[in-house]
Structure formats: C-alpha cells, structure tokens
Amino acid sequence: MSTRTDSGGDDPIIESRDQLIAAFAKGAKPKDRWRIGTEHEKFVYSRKDHHAPSYDERGGIHTLLIGLTRYGWNPVFEGENIIALSGTDGTISLEPAGQLELSGAPLENLHQTCAETSRHLEQVKYVGDMLGLGFLGLGMWPDKSREELPIMPKGRYDIMLRHMPRVGSMGLDMMLRTCTIQTNLDYGSEADMVKKFRVSLALQPLATALFANSPFTDGKPNGFLSYRSHIWSDTDPGRTGMLPFVFEDGFGYERYADYALDVPMYFVYRDGRYIDAAGQSFRDFLDGKLPALPGEKPTEKDWEDHLSTAFPEVRMKSFLEMRGADGGPWNRICALPALWVGLLYDDGALDAAWDLVKDWSMEERQVLRDSVPRLALDAPIAGGRKLRDIAGDVLDIARSGLSARARLNASGDNETGYLAPLDEIVASGQTHAERLLARYHGEWQGDLGKIYAEESF
C-alpha cells in the first residue's frame, strides 16, 4: 500500500471536476515512454521458530530496514519510526503485519525488471541471514492466525484496521495475512486506456489462476487454490470488484472519477499524521463539508491518496495496476509483468486479446471471477468451456507481443523467456497451489512446517 511522506500542504486545492479527471489524463504517454513497474510482497519470518517478527523486537522489522540501508536505501520516517526506504530501485515499504514490499522503479524492459528483482532479493536475503530472518513467497500466511501477527506503526493502518470489520468479514485477513505481485503499466490515450482496462479486467481471473498460491489457512488446506483472491470477495464491497461500468459505452477518465468519488474515504493526511475519515465522502470533501476536516477542501495530493484506497481487480491512477496475482517465487515475479506487457504493450496482441473476451457478458465475467479462487484453471468461461481452454492462447498472444517488442538483453534474448513458468503451468495443467497440496498430502505427511524450506526465497 502507498507510503505517504509529506503533508501535501503546498498542493493545489481542487477547485473543479477537471482536476480530478486530469489526474488520469496526465498519465497518457507516447509509446516510447511506456514503462513497467513491478511490485512484490513477501512474508518475513524468524528462521528459529517461524514466528512473524514485530517491528520493535531485537532483529525484527525495524532492524531489517536499518540493515538494508547498507545498500544505499534512504530511510522514510513517519514520526520517529522508519516505515519505508527509498532508492534508485524504487521503494521498500511495510504492509500491515510486516510483509515486505518492493515497489520497483519504472523500467523500460523486463530484463531490467528481473535484474531489479534479483538485486532486491539478494539484499534482503543477505541482511536476513545476519538477523536469522527468512522470506516466504506465498499468497497467504499458511499457518498464522490474525492474533499471531504484529502490527506495523503506520497511521493509515490503524484507521483501516478499525474500519475493516465494519464493512466485511475478511478485510483484516487481506491486510495481515496476504501477499501479492502487481504490475503497473502505462497507456497512450484515453481510448488506449479503455481498451487496456477492459482486456486486463476481463483476463484478471486468468492471472489469478496462473499465479494461484494460497491453498492453506491456519495450518491446513482451506478448500481454495487462491484464498487470497477469495478474501477480496468480502473485504469491502464499496471499493472492490470487477467494475461492470468499465465495459459500458462511454467509459473513460470521467466515469472512473465518478466511481472513485463514490468510494468511501479512509483518511486525510495532514502535517505528518493521518486523520480518520473512514466511511466519509470525498464528494463532501469537495464541498468543504468533510466531518473530519470541516471547512477544508481537498488538494490534488488528497485525491491521489484517495485513489490508492480503491481496490478493484484493476485500478487506475495515472497508470493501470494489475491486482489479481498471489505472491510467489522469483521466477513468477518476473512472469507477471511478462504476461501483461505482452498482452497490453503491442497493438496486435491487444487486439487479439480483446477478440478473445469482447463477447463475454458481465454475468459470465462475474461467474469467472467468483469461481477462480477455488477452481483456478477449471473455472467456467463463456461457451461452456473452462479457463484452461484459453490459457495457452492467451500466453501465445502475450508471447507474440513480447516478440514484437524485440527488447533484447546482452545475450540477444528477447523477453519471451519470462513466460516459461506460466507455459509450464498450462502444459502440466497444474497450478503451484495444487502442487503444494499434493506435497502436503504426500511427502510432507501433513507437516506444513516443510513449506518454509520449500517456498522461501
């Protein structure tokens, strides 16, 4: 989740609706300036007893952040606490229960993305070795209850932790017990954004299936392949979901702004602290009638903050965020941006992907979204088929898009090799979650502690 480091006091006051829409319009870039931003989270645990370390304990999360400064990362403070690090490779931040996230820099190609990922993992592993910490690549804590997990000292999390139980049964699980991989991509115009949004939203369940990696909860199988994805079904209906309006005629920047205005607020950031505005209306804020800050109107930075508190399957800020995948190992961190860059950054691939999904009804899209957490590649799609029936076609389209980009590394290889982990899943017909379940019931003999040796970075 976003880390705020300034009060926004010098930001322009929002005086008109045009400023809301401009936040999206300013994201439009010529194709030669399109970039790839990749975010990935991992669970931190003590190698001694597998507990999740607190912020303050000896050798815990604060010490881990301090240790990473040896690589040139600069501390970011909230009050007296270091809550993030900034550097040339982006930002390292903390999720609510100490999950460690790299929000990578905007990069030109996937070779750079994978190199950035490798640097980050080498750094955290080196510091982790000194502290006795390990890092687990899964979509959900396999064996930790909410009560066993620490809370990081970030003001926005205090607000969210209070608010989540009011609006859904699994919001606290989302905050405390899940990890994801995300990819942030650019668009060239409003029309280009619309097409990319529609394709990526329709196919987001395929990413969920291919990256399914959260089949355990509280130390035993949970009946799902991506329980992380299922959690979003009852987190907060006012800010999640498949956004049917994206597929309606007339969708564009303005319609998304209307949606975001109707997303209930969480907070306003002022003078280094978060002010609780949970459940209040940004529309009231525009009118100077926000109960949390009576008489004040929002700044452009407030709008940017608010956009970060909507959690649909695909999210727009000044770029598009792909939000459907579980956390996972190194090669799948590289595979997620490969999938979406291949589909969305080449016009021929984008057209071909749209042809696959353009005739699906909203009901069919929703059934797919609802089914995929449990069924993954066996989830139903239009025409009486299953998701696995088009998975290979989608990967072929992505491969063609990556080939057309012709971004080569020093060895002369293009970017298509990063799809290999997904090709293997489609060829075998078995997701990583299903393989973990087979091990649990087989060679592990029900001992889920084995997962720490098998799935750590």
Image (spheres, helix red, strand yellow):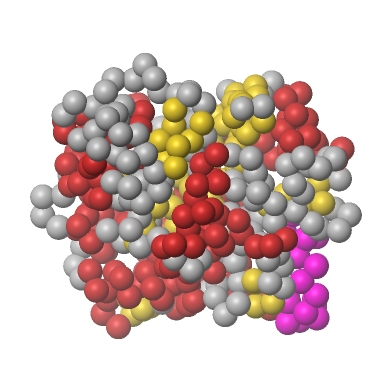
Q: Residue at x 48, y 68 (%)?
A: 169
Find residue 364 and report its horizontal and vertical position in percent.
27, 74
Chain part drawn in magenta = 439-457
Find residue 349 and report its horizontal and vertical position in percent.
30, 50
Find residue 51 and report its horizontal and vertical position in percent.
79, 57
Is 188 left, or right, of 312 in this rendering?
A: left
Total marks shown come to 0
Q: Residue at x 51, y 42 (%)?
A: 156
Does residue 355 appear in the picture of this structure? Answer: no
Q: Residue at x 60, y 56 (%)?
A: 176
Outermost residue on the left side: it is: 250
Is 318 left, or right, of 223 in this rendering?
A: left
Q: In front: 77, or 47?
A: 77
Q: In front: 49, or 205?
A: 49
Find residue 54 and report its horizontal and vertical position in percent.
75, 47
Please say if 95 is above or below 104.
below
User: Is 328 a magenta residue?
Assistant: no
Is 197 left, or right, of 96 in this rendering?
A: left
Q: In front: 305, or 162?
A: 162
Does residue 75 appear in the picture of this structure? Answer: yes
Please say if 250 is above or below 454.
above
User: Is 452 a magenta residue?
Assistant: yes
Q: Residue at x 71, y 67 (%)?
A: 143
